[in-house]
Image (tube, rainbow, N blue to C red):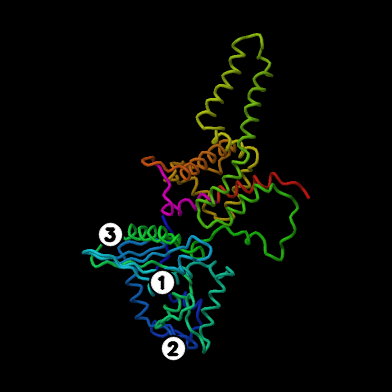
Amino acid sequence: MSWQPVVDEMSIMKGLRLIFRSNGEESGDFTLRDPIQMLEGKTISGVSSTEISTIVTHLNQAKSKTESSFRWEKEAEFSLVSLDSIGAFDRFFEDKTFTGQGDNPVTFKVGRPSREFAAYLLCIVAQNPTFLTSPRNRMILNRLRGSDRQDFTLVRNGRPLETDSLFDLLSAGFRATTLRITAAKARSDFETLANSFLFHAAYNTDAAARIGLESMFRPQAIQRVRRTQTGALDAPRQTYDADLVHHYLMGVAAEIPLLEYLAYYHIAEHFFGKVFNEDLINQVRSGITDPSFSARRDKDIQSIVRIVTKIKGQIKDEGGVNEQRSLQLVLDRFVSIPRLVTDLDAYDANLVDYYANSDVPFAGASKVSIRANDEEAVRGAIAKRIYKVRNALVHAKEGELPKYAPFAHDEELAREIPLMRFAAEQIVIAQGRVL
């Protein structure tokens, strides 16, 4: 289930206090210490309790909502994330409106969030204590706080915007983009309409976006700044394999969970052929060096043939090595379970229990008790979970269940990434050579 902040007057007031300098709050109103003088001659002195209450009521009357959308009977609003690094989607569609035909015409508008959605983002800020620690987010904060300059004007993509409310300033200052859909009559298929619009836009313009929250508004990502402060960071003491480093960097830089997960998986996959062949050799060597083996007995020779035949069958079925077996062999060789538990606990104290109590529905992957005493069994269970998640990501045949749905299952997939990433990190480090 997606994480959602509580939308209420208290959270909005807390968010306003975090961003703007207050002159005090009377009767639920939020008054700015220094009223904002807009270039168009308007003055914004704060937000009334009535406006806050109206916004909260409207948001909480939504028929359905997720972390990135609100849907009512005749309207909906979806947060969008541009899928290119230069913001082509935002620039092309900014403040454009498209209206369909028919008995129930639908209107699509891309642009800055509504006041209601801006208030919702403000609630996220209020309930996410790490928000203000990000350098990018501090820049947003400083920009918004700088709005009390006498020459301030609200600009988005080079154009001044009309501003009548403090929430208008927030909607532009957050630099978020939403898709607002309105219909003449009640509908229940707003998400389908949104995805249809995004396909239509990408097909015609090559500008792509998806439904979702910008990363700065999402719960914490894995951030290594928590391991060490910049001033305490020293020079590396090992060199690492370039191919592994490149996969790791791709995972760290990826903003799409699917790509992030597969980048870390490829680090383990790098060694599949090597460990699988070595395992086959070891099985054969163990058989022929066993004191009970005799090259003169046909049944002993046949036992070795059976080992090889079984492995060959697995290779044929898999189209190569037995990947799940190879994954477990890689984990056996390179991954320390106690260190994995320590990393997971340091990142999120609830994750190990989550893996022990929760399946992965979109992958059909089972629970895994990482704190169990039998480390070999734990690695086997981890390998099964990781491999099934990987298969769900790369196989999407019609009618096959379970199956990963892009974006729809990103929240569940995000919970699997720490397990894959921390295992991959140990694999990279295990290949390191002392400088």
Mark 3 or mark 1, earlier in chain: 1
Q: Which mark is residue 40?
A: 2
Magenta span? 401-417
Picture mark count: 3
Q: Nearer the viewer, residue 6 or 363?
A: 363
Residue 73 in view, yes or no: no
The CA distance from mark 3 to mark 1 is 21 Å
Residue that mark 1 sits on: 113
**Amino acid type of disc 3?**
Ser
Residue 98 in view, yes or no: yes
Q: Is residue 359 left or right of residue 142?
A: left
**Amino acid type of disc 2?**
Glu
- Seen as rendered, the residue at the extreme left is 103
Helix, strand or loop status at disc 3: loop
Q: Position of residue 408 (x, y in %)?
A: 41, 53
The structure residue drawn at horizontal position 67% and vertical position 18%, both measured from the top left corner, is 288
